[in-house]
Image (cartoon, rainbow, N blue to C red):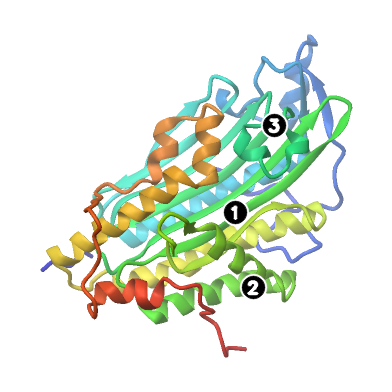
Amino acid sequence: MHAKGGAGPPPKGIKHGTPRGKGLSKPQRLTRVNNESAGSDAMLAPLFGRQPAWALPPPCCKVILVSIQTEAVKAYLLDLQDRICAALEAEDGGARFSEDAWTRPAGGGGRTRVIADGAVIEKGGVNFSHVFGAGLPPSASAHRPELAGRGFEALGVSLVIHPENPHVPTSHANVRFFSAEKEGEAPVWWFGGGFDLTPYYAVEEDCVHWHQVARKACEPFGADVYPRFKEWCDRYFHLKHRNEPRGIGGLFFDDLNQWDFETCFAFIRAIGDAYIEAYLPIIQRRKLTPYGEREREFQAFRRGRYVEFNLVYDRGTLFGLQSGGRTESILMSLPPQVRWGYDWKPEPGTPEARLTDYFLTDRDWLAGQS
């Protein structure tokens, strides 16, 4: 048996957890910069400050639209990456994240942070990226064909944590911001993201807690937000070829610009900040639960479902590959050990069978709770 135990603060006026309708005092005018002009570097400096080379707009673009809002989002995302990594390192206690800063030849770059072989985390990554391009990849414009061919700017934090102990679920979270630009037209912006949980030996207490935190994060933005984005998560993280969910869900949303910018940005901060609150208590409750080879084998089979979803359906994976992103960072989400078996199924009546029979159903985990 086994048992195993950056960036500075956001710009002035931006606070974590700011309620809807607050944040930036008002939408700021987009600043247009012609990169061919002799003074382009001087014009960019007040907006970007001291940034690594990969964080600056690509010199190949003739016209770049830089917004104060985008810089506020970027500052938040860099800080979010720092805070999540610090919290996970402290909980693991046996490993630290290593950072790999990278540059994307077509424009932009990011910093990939990975952790492996820890006391709790077998493999994990918390990535920040900020990329530019001349045309939106098909995965980003499929649901909005009117944006096809527009230049784009995309930035976000994406993470996946694969604990070694099969009693500790895998978790995933993502928050992102897109802007699609076309000469002579106003940029179109939107947010996306969410978080979801993939247990192997699920416990109802953990599932309820996960969804309680998700609902609490959504409540300031309207009573309909949690049920709507919870249902969207159930639909999105569904393996059609298996006819089963990837996990017990959480929140998922995309193309979010239904509110003004300040409210949408406040919402994305609420979701990003809620991830650690949702996940750490589950790790703490389950990380010392004994397990053996049977549990590890089942975990490997179920991780196969995770791989299938990420390589076949996941929009983030497809966007990264289609936009010429960094392959190692994109595939960071895949687990370190995985297994497939022909027509493999758990024995009826076992704890392994209970996962699919009871937990992997699109249920209302908060039914009856006020």
Say above or below: 351 vs 264.
below
Q: Secondary structure at mark 1?
A: strand
Tag of residue 193: 1
Determine which residue is flagged by label 2.
Answer: 227
Between 206 and 285, the residue placed more toward the observer is 206
Q: Amino acid at mark 2?
A: Pro
- Classify 10 Å Cα crowding around label 2: few (below 14), some (14-19), many (20 and above): some
Q: Secondary structure at mark 3?
A: strand
Between 346 and 42, the residue placed more toward the observer is 346
Q: Amino acid at mark 1?
A: Gly
Q: Residue furthest left?
A: 1
Q: Earlier in the sequence, mark 2 or mark 1?
A: 1
Q: Quadrant of the C terminus?
A: bottom right
Is residue 23 at least partly visible in the picture?
no
Between 76 and 301, the residue placed more toward the observer is 301
Marks 2/3 in contact by CB < 8 Å: the verdict is no
- Horizontal side of residue 61 vs 161, given as left or right: right
Mark 2 vs mark 1, foreground winner is 2
Say above or below: 131 vs 144.
above
Tag of residue 324: none
C-alpha separation, residue under disc 1 versus residue under disc 3: 18 Å
Q: Amino acid at mark 3?
A: Phe
Say above or below: 136 vs 87.
above
C-alpha separation, residue under disc 2 versus residue under disc 3: 31 Å
Tag of residue 152: 3
Residue 283 pos. (x, y %): 35, 68
Residue 86 pos. (x, y %): 43, 54
Q: Secondary structure at mark 2?
A: helix
Residue in the picture at 57% in, 90% down = 368
Q: Quadrant of the N terminus?
A: bottom left
